[in-house]
Image (spheres, rainbow, N blue to C red):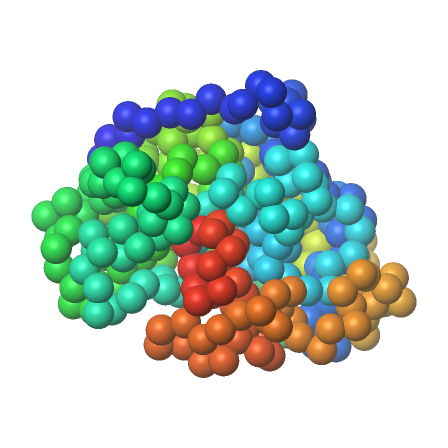
Amino acid sequence: MMIIRSRPPDPSDPSTPCDQPAVRAQELTVVRGTRTVLRGLEFAVPRGQITGLLGPSGCGKSTLMRSIVGTQAKVAGTLDVLGRPAGDPALRSRIGYVTQAPSVYDDLTVRQNLAYFAAILDPGRAAAERRRADVTQAIADVDLTSHADALAGNLSGGQRSRVSLAVALLGTPELLVLDEPTVGLDPVLRRDLWNLFHTIAAERNATLLVSSHVMDEAERCHRLLLMREGRILADDTPDALRARFDSDTVEAAFLRLVDEATAAGNQPAKDAEPTPDATSASDATSASDDKTASDAKTAPGEASATGDGQGTDSRTGDPTRKETAR
Ligand SMILES: Nc1ncnc2c1ncn2[C@@H]1O[C@H](COP(=O)(O)OP(=O)(O)OP(=O)(O)O)[C@@H](O)[C@H]1O
């Protein structure tokens, strides 16, 4: 895989100073249904690095990512992304988002899927040649050139995930939010994808937030946010975490952190009711878990976007796409 594109931050845009973190959260609390899923999170994600978001299933990783890309309702506290409040429409073209479930059009080829999103991001006849080049490059980035003309419906699960990732890479976003991008991939592809992530961070100065519940992937990140039951247990580098507990692996350090939190009686009740603060969030009156559900239409192969719908496409604002890549 190879990345040759690069877009430095626009110095004339006051929201892109590189000394500011890409994401900053203060007292971030999120309620889903009757449950407080994220509880007063405080953290910063530095620019130009890969930050791993790790923790057991159900600890709140996807909810945090949805909050960052602006598709999660009932978000209270402060959450700034690339210098703007999370969900600000100006962020749509600056963030690439890949959900856990790849959402691609099965009846289109890989290239046609990419071309569709490229046309939304960079419309107009004058941009046709640039779009074609971007699409070809994004397909090469995820190593799908030999399948470019295959129908997405005929791809394997891992290949479909990579189509979603390719969509997210279009337009060289400053922030890539990737929800468990390596699930179901074989070890060689996982290694290649992590190499790709590092290349993107190094060559484009992009920020990557990558979730996983596979602890060996923690070792591949510059920084880690370790989560458990809606709280952040640690925000540090892998080296610092291992050193802190004199352990060989981040996994061992994480287990020690869990033991410490348990011993300190720091375990949140699993079925706690929402806090008064959380329900005072600006959009807390919405019955939906999805911030933009009222605008969303049904995407291919998916149910209605109401209820716990996945939301309007975060990158393009395309209401026909729900929280796919971009
Ligand atoms: N629509 C919903 N309504 C109520 N609770 C929800 C909803 N969606 C998720 N939750 C709850 O929110 C919590 C966090 O879920 P989330 O999907 O963010 O976890 P996760 O860490 O991404 O898990 P996984 O690794 O399994 O994807 C879980 O306890 C889950 O049951």
Residue at screen point 80% across, 51% down: 77
Q: Is residue 122 visible?
A: yes
Residue at screen point 63% across, 22% down: 17
Residue 65 placement (x, y as % from top left): 57, 53
Residue 31 placement (x, y as % from top left): 73, 67
Question: In this rendering, is residue 159 above or below 79?
Answer: below
Name the image quarter holding the N terminus: top left
Residue 272 placement (x, y as % from top left): 79, 73
Question: 234 or 296, which is in the foreground?
Answer: 296
Question: 301 or 233, which is in the foreground?
Answer: 301
Residue 38 placement (x, y as % from top left): 71, 59
Question: 311 or 203, which is in the foreground?
Answer: 311
In the rendered view, does 205 fall on the left or right side of 288?
Answer: left
Residue 244 position by quadrant: top right
Question: In this rendering, is residue 118 above or below 20?
Answer: below
In the rendered view, does 144 fall on the left or right side of 4?
Answer: left
Residue at screen point 67% across, 25% down: 14
Outermost residue on the front side: it is: 125
Residue at screen point 70% across, 44% down: 85
Q: Is residue 222 visible?
A: no
